[in-house]
Amino acid sequence: MPDLLAGTTVKANDTPVTVFNEQVGNYQFSNATFGVGTTGGTYADCGVAFVAPTTGRIEIGWSGEGFHSVAASAVELSPFVRTGTTVGAGTTFLASVINNKLRLVSIAINSITHGGMTMIVSGLTPGSSYNVRLDHRTNGATGNWTYRKVSVKPCT
């Protein structure tokens, strides 16, 4: 993948627009593996479709407010990147994994915590369409997420 170095003529396809999505609904879940299963509340996929820049590198940023029904228990969010423009569909490029997670631990029962993360993803095919969706999991009992946000911006 070519780098955009000083003096390089930049074309529109080199730096696609930054895309962003926010879902404010509160929902509950009890799944122990990353996914989108829910047990109640208002869930909607938090994700975006994007075009890979010339460099094949993007920065994903994500955040949310989470809480748990058990003190000292955790809720986690992780991005899942797939090919294509339909959020949540397509061939896996980067699965939600423990190494790429935002983990929030409730200090007390149902105490709300807010956090965010960013990561660089490389190896994307320049000009190709991809999508990213935030998946969630918990380490037991019932977790909650609200005010989830995700953004994708091109990296030079």
Image (cartoon, grey):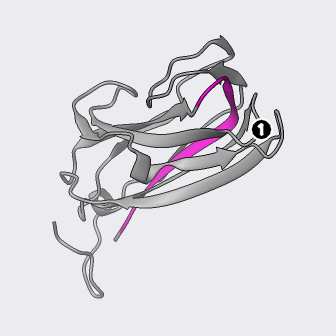
Q: Nearer the viewer, residue 77 or 89?
A: 77
Give the image location of residue 139, x and y in percent.
57, 34
Q: Nearer the viewer, residue 22 or 53?
A: 22
Give the image location of residue 80, x and y in percent.
38, 38
The span shown in magenta is: 140-155
Give the image location of residue 109, x and y in percent.
82, 34
Query: Taking 84 as reference, is 64 left or right?
Result: right
Query: Taking 108 as reference, is 54 left or right?
Result: left
Q: Is residue 83 magenta?
A: no
* The N terminus, quarter of image: bottom left
Would you say residue 21 is visible in this rendering? Answer: no
Which is the main secondary structure of the residues drawn in magenta? Answer: strand
Q: How many marks?
A: 1
Query: Taking 52 as reference, is 100 left or right?
Result: right
Residue that appears at 28% across and 65% down: 11
Amino acid type assigned to the residue bearing label 1 in the image: Ala
The residue beneath circle 1 is: 71
Farthest residue to the bottom: give it. 6
Q: Nearer the viewer, residue 156 or 112?
A: 112
* The C terminus, quarter of image: bottom left
Residue that appears at 27% across and 76% down: 4
Would you say residue 52 is visible in this rendering? Answer: yes
At numbered mark 1, what does the secondary structure look like: helix, strand or loop? loop
Q: Is residue 145 magenta?
A: yes
Give the image location of residue 60, x and y in percent.
45, 53
